[in-house]
Image: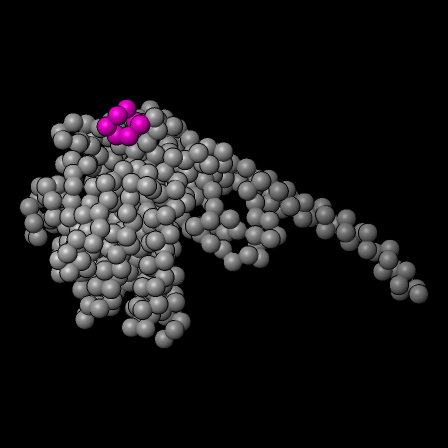
Amino acid sequence: MKYLSRNILQLPIALLVATVVLFPFIRIIINKPHLYGSSSLERTEEEETRECNIYSGHWATYHVKEPYYTNETCPHIIDQFNCIKFGRPDREFLKLRWKPYGCELPLFNATEFLRLVQGKSMAFVGDSMGRNQMDSLICLLNTEGRFEDITERYTSKDDVFFRWWFSPSYNFTLTILWSPFLVKATGADLRGKAFDGSMNLYLDEPNDAWASKIEDFDYVIFSSGQWFYRPLTFYEKGHVVGSQQGGKDIKDLNLYGYKKAFQTSFRTIINLTRFKGLTFLVTQSAKHFEHGEYNDGGNCNRTRPFTKEERQGYGYREVLEAMHQIQVEEYREAEKEARKKGLQFGLIDISDAMSMRPDGHPDKYGLIYNKNVKVVDCVHWCLPGAIDTWNEFLFYQIKQAINKKSTSI
């Protein structure tokens, strides 16, 4: 009892000493500045124990870091995406970062990314959204890897639809292979000079523009969707199997063509003899025209993300969800087949995150033309800006794939 009484008396003294000693450290932890705008974004106990999905989250103000690059530090931004150069006055859209529920999305690290892809090659295959993402990636990497335009080794230097870049320091090749439908297409407007031109799609034939070049690439990134709003006629085995009048509403679209285009593309890359690379699908990117379309007074001049209430009224939501569902379903089927052959497929699911960002487009602060007339752009994304998140996702997924492959050996 004597020793017990002594210990009981010593306990308050020990607690007092510990509090005095540890108080400065406790205060630092309590007062540690939050990376995002509110401490309410801290992870809850439920979030801590839940497996993280980096594609489920929200946009939050990020106070610590400036944009990865600017239009002054990256000389490779084309005028179509260079919003600051063409007078966009606000900057709040540059301070937002994607915050997954339950975990952190790692910051993009140019040095680590280039070490992962050293000696390798990467191709973006699809429409101008792929070009938009590739230009973002070049800017993210340029401070470390310094890229040279080697397009004229493969095609005309003035050909903006096929671009080739090379980093001598890392022996890394990067290209965009223009194929807006992924499958073979004919029509009067293969280069996008008019946004409503009628096209013929051969749904069972991959576009040779990428299929004949892709076999030796280490990374292939598919992104396609924006051209599927046009008037289209579908062919299989040389015969017409369907069509659509085109438009922004689900009733105007026949998504059979969209579905078959991905089926054909995935099947093609899985069946290539020499291809051993990693294939990614980037899901459908949201567009945000309000008060009309590009040709009848539409705009996207918001300066902040949608609120939850505003998101409910998003005009393209039904079409976006339908196209996204098709992509994910076809991806899952293809991933199963790829796995049987020892190939890796990955999904970069940007649809939900980007649907919240009506503030991220060039609007009138870019150069894009339809039939030689400048139009408002609510389809593509400003550089720098929200699209840099796509490459944070890509960086994360490449690391995950490499780790998965190394642990399975």
Q: Would you say residue 293 sits in the magenta stretch?
A: yes
Q: Would you say residue 296 sits in the magenta stretch?
A: yes
Q: Quadrant of the N terminus?
A: bottom right
Outermost residue on the right side: it is: 1
Q: Quadrant of the C terminus?
A: bottom left
What residue do we see at 33% from left, 42% from top?
250
Q: Residue 16 vs residue 39: left or right?
A: right
Q: Is residue 139 visible?
A: no
Say above or below: 102 vs 269. above
Q: Is residue 77 visible?
A: yes
Magenta-tinted stretch: 292-300
Q: Position of residue 295 (x, y in %)?
A: 23, 28
Say above or below: 280 vs 139. below
What residue do we see at 50% from left, 39% from top?
36
Residue 396: quadrant of the picture: bottom left
What residue do we see at 22% from left, 34% from top?
80
Q: Position of residue 302 (x, y in %)?
A: 38, 28
What residue do we see at 49% from left, 55% from top?
52
Q: Position of residue 111 (x, y in %)?
A: 31, 53
